[in-house]
Amino acid sequence: EAGVAQSPRYKIIEKRQSVAFWCNPISGHATLYWYQQILGQGPKLLIQFQNNGVVDDSQLPKDRFSAERLKGVDSTLKIQPAKLEDSAVYLCASSFGTDEKLFFGSGTQLSVL
Amino acid sequence: DAKTTQPPSMDCAEGRAANLPCNHSTISGNEYVYWYRQIHSQGPQYIIHGLKNNETNEMASLIITEDRKSSTLILPHATLRDTAVYYCIVRPLSGGSNYKLTFGKGTLLTVNP
């Protein structure tokens, strides 16, 4: 079966610029997650969707980060404006339900200069 | 914050069993132990999970102590492709604010030829 698709694979921007990441989950998976992974650390959950509704966004820096999943399938994560400390790998994951195992994409590596 | 403690790194010879320990002394009765691994430049991959009984699948075995305060992930015949960061995660059965998958720093397992 096709896995979780993410694009772009790499992105380099300057601070204060904006950037967007795209995720296509596994077909039929209702739950979608965005994680941020800073070098040397484990992934940190930014936001969790159940279909097109937000379940948990408690660790999302809402002054600069936004995410949407309008039709309950694809999702985009946006950063505006970016800061140096946003340099990280942004991982998307999906699961069939909230208590099921997660399937991760390969991530987008963001470098903010 | 992660509720588990793992050694930062371990080595294993190719073909030998890799035994990865995890301490979770504050685990609650309704919390599962999950293991994921992350190969370099890839997203995390689910390995196995358990509540109180030992579990085995095609990838690994999970041994949970009787008091549930610690567990061991066993890769019976490690290969070079098993070199990865292994995350031990405690997660409630369902619902609640702590339901999300919270990653620590994990254990970097290096399988040597």
Image (cartoon, grey):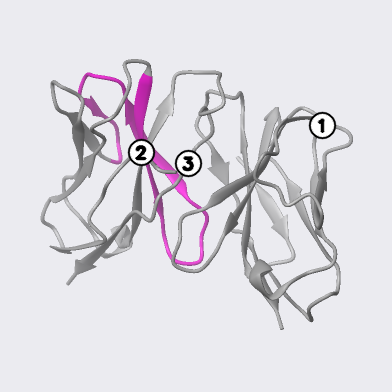
Task: Identify which residue, A42 or A83, lies in the foreground.
Answer: A83
Residue B74 in picture, x, y percent from top left: 19, 43
Q: Name the image quarter holding the N terminus of chain A.
A: top right
Q: Nearer the viewer, mark 2 or mark 3?
A: 2
SS type, badge 2: loop
The residue tagged 3 is B102
Q: In the visual, does A75 lie left or right of B38?
A: right
Q: Which residues are magenta?
A: B31-59
Question: Would you say residue A3 is visible in this rendering?
Answer: no
Task: Give how far apart the Cα atoms at labels 2 and 1 are.
Answer: 32 Å
The residue tagged 2 is B3
Tag 2–tag 3 contact (CB < 8 Å):
yes
Q: In the visual, does A87 lie left or right of B107?
A: right
Q: Residue at x 52, y 27 (%)?
A: B99
Picture layout, residue A85 above or below residue B57: below
Q: In the visual, does A66 lie left or right of B46?
A: right
Image disc number at residue A72: 1
Question: Would you say residue A6 is visible in this rendering?
Answer: yes
Task: Give how far apart the Cα atoms at labels 1 and 3 are.
Answer: 24 Å
The kind of residue on which mark 3 rests is: Thr
- Answer with the quarter of the image where residue B85 lies: bottom left
